[in-house]
Amino acid sequence: MIRILRDRPIGSVDPRLHSGFVEHMGRCVNGGVWDGEKVNEEVRAAMAEIAHPVLRWPGGCFADDYRWRDGIGPRADRPVRVTAHWGVDEIDENGFGSHEFVDFCRSIGTEPWFGLNLGVDGPREGGDWFEYANFRGDTTLTRERAANGHPDAFDVTYWGIGNESWDCGGKLSPEDYAKAYRRMDAHLPSFSNVVRPQFVAVGPDGNNAGEAANWTERVLDEWNRWRTPRVAWWDAHFYLWATDGECGSITEFDEWQTGTLFDRAAKLDDLIVQQRAILDAKPLYGRPRIDLCIGEWGVWHGGGPPTEIRYHGLRDAAVCAAMLDTFHRHADKVKMANIAQTVNILGAPINVSEEGVVVRSPIWDVFVMYRAHRGGVSVPMEADDPRVLGSATLHSDRTVVSLVNSSHEPIAVALPFVPTSCRMLAHEDITARNLPDDPDRVRARAASWNGTLPPLAVALLES
Ligand code: AHR
């Protein structure tokens, strides 16, 4: 039996909870979004169907090495660089830079998020990029932007200040990060005629509960010691680690291993509860409240370096659905989340094979199905069977419920309403996935609700 507690509104599901992330890592940008000369049109179409409200770029760890000037001007003149964060030498010709990224975002109705380099550059470079992108007046930098094809400002709202500064972004202590952030903030000019920027601060490693509390408390304490910086977002990262064999692999797993996978996914809830408590207990003096963002989340399987293409299956889609449901249940505090990453690597909804075949993974189906939740008021949903997970949203004209079966057994579920529509992501083979030679093996389909949730299925019901 499912119960929907309609009289206990949590908050509105911010569409930005369904946001994305593309990094210059593996074949995510180069070989994924970007084919070397232009955007891959099939990827554009697949991403337009997901409709991420915000897209984060250029990293990740890559952002703290990135020289923004490498990615502007005639492509033939752009420098070729190497990065090696993941044990792999990655060569980048810089064909996909600020202009290409912003044009791509605008073409699919997504807002760009630029990640500023706090690792090796700093306020001077950050301020220049900010002026180049957003200033609407006539300066040397904005003339250069115009000469490169963009007379109008990019109007980038979201600006990350560093990435994982506790590790690849500099291995900084919380206090050192707080000071570096304050310095960057102070030197990002408050131009009068720019779109109002929202700065994203580096939150904790969400996979390490003790360190996560320590990081957040100490950064906030340091900021409150002296004049507080502008901060709109606190960006915690959480990966569903499945690299140690305890969760099986993408295609081979038993029910115990699936239980482990879902148990680990449930730690996301603990992280959100912990972080929101600290943020609420330590407001920044004289500043508006800081919203919580999970700027990187997703399933991270082993079996090779993380730069390799991963083709996910039904089980990964089900656990991602459960994590989106977790965000919905904290809709009053968590306002943005970015799947890591949208194309090809880690928990990708979209794959592009080395031969160029575009494959929508079952995770893609979940994102498309869950669009129905956006903008609705999240309310608690209870299930008698603890193996049934999900979330519920109330809209002016309908109720939307997503259900996830976290087990290998079919489960009978009694609904408190008669659904007017049902989309079901399920497969008789629970290890099934989509591959280049069979790209639509696992697909969400319209179904008539028969009262049973198949193993590892995701259902989207409306009434
Ligand atoms: O998403 C892949 C990597 O994971 C990112 O570059 C980094 O921020 C995180 O550790």
Image (tube, rainbow, N blue to C red):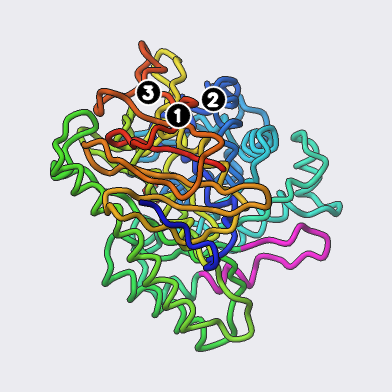
Please state which of residues 448 and 176 is positioned toward the viewer in this rendering. Answer: 448
* Quadrant of the image occupied by residue 89: top left
Vertical placement of residue 306 versus 394, above or below: above
Vertical placement of residue 364 versus 463, above or below: above
**Mark 2 element type:** helix
Could one spot residue 91 in this view of the protein?
no
Nearer-N-terminus badge (1/2): 2
Nearer-N-terminus badge (3/1): 1
Q: Are marks 3 and 2 in contact (CB under 8 Å)?
A: no
| Kind of residue sitting beneath label 1 | Ile
- Check disc 3 and report the residue beneath it: 442
Given the current orientation, which residue lies at the most extreme bottom position? 225
Vertical placement of residue 284 versus 123, above or below: below
Residue 267 counted in the magenta span: no
Give the residue at x 59% y 85%.
Answer: 227
Give the total of numbered labels: 3
Ligand 1 within 8 Å of the CB at mark 2: no
Find the distance from the CA under tag 3 to the CA under tag 2.
Answer: 18 Å
Q: From the viewer's perspective, is 447 left or right of 269?
A: right
Q: Which residues are magenta?
A: 181-198
Q: Which mark is residue 350?
A: 1
| Kind of residue sitting beneath label 3 | Val
Q: From the viewer's perspective, is 107 left or right of 342?
A: right
Q: Which mark is residue 43?
A: 2
**Mark 1 element type:** strand
| Kind of residue sitting beneath label 2 | Val
Give the residue at x 30% y 52%.
Answer: 265
Please state which of residues 188 and 294 is positioned toward the viewer in this rendering. Answer: 294
Give the residue at x 49% y 34%.
Answer: 422
